[in-house]
Image (cartoon, rainbow, N blue to C red):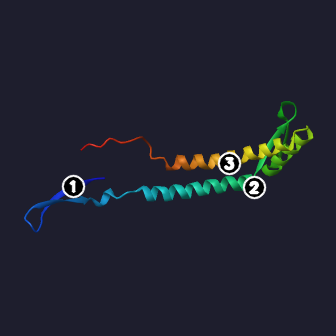
Amino acid sequence: MAEESRDEPTDQGVSAATPVVEPDAAPVGHRHRRGAAVVWLLAVAGLAVFVALGTATIRTGFRLRSERSLPVTELWWRFTEELADEGAAALVRVGVYGALALVLAGSALGLWLALTADGGGPRSRRG
């Protein structure tokens, strides 16, 4: 923050230093956070829409010749059903969904931290 001090006379004839803040030195942190919040909200909403409505292409077979698209939610549902068919306990399936929730929440948190990072450590001030 760029500050100067001007000596102004007071009632008792002694000058007091009055800090003067230049208009171009206004803090921009609030505008940066608001913009970051908008970008973050759009990215997280896009991820949620993809998980809810998106499709993923699955390639199977010899040399990946068979290809089909499945909705993401159906893909996860089939994966947990396959776990049940293979004898996995219900706790394992709950753990898979818990891990999925942690990945989504971690992605949202990581994106927020990346968008709001100020770009460095402590800055040195010269007095």
Element carrying mark 1:
strand
Mark closest to the chain's N terminus, 1 or 2:
1
Residue depicted at 31% across the width and 53% down the height: 1
Q: Which amino acid does label 3 sit on?
A: Leu
Q: Nearer the viewer, residue 56 or 104?
A: 104
The residue at which mark 3 appears reads as 104
Provide the secondary structure element on which disc 2 rests. helix
Residue at numbered disc 2? 52
Q: Which mark is residue 49?
A: none
* Secondary structure under the numbered disc 3 in the rendered image: helix
- Occupied quadrant, residue 90: top right
User: Residue shown at 68%/48% (left/top)?
Assistant: 104
Q: Is residue 5 above or below residue 83?
A: below
* Residue at 48%, 56% in the rendered image: 33
Measured in 3D between alpha carbons, the distance from the residue under mark 1 to the one under mark 2, in whole angstroms, is 56 Å
Badge number at residue 4: 1
Mark-to-mark CA distance, 2 and 3:
13 Å
Front position among marks 2 and 3: 3
Report how far apart the C-alphas of labels 3 and 1 lie in the structure. Answer: 48 Å
Q: Which amino acid does label 2 sit on?
A: Ala
Q: Is residue 92 left or right of residue 8?
A: right
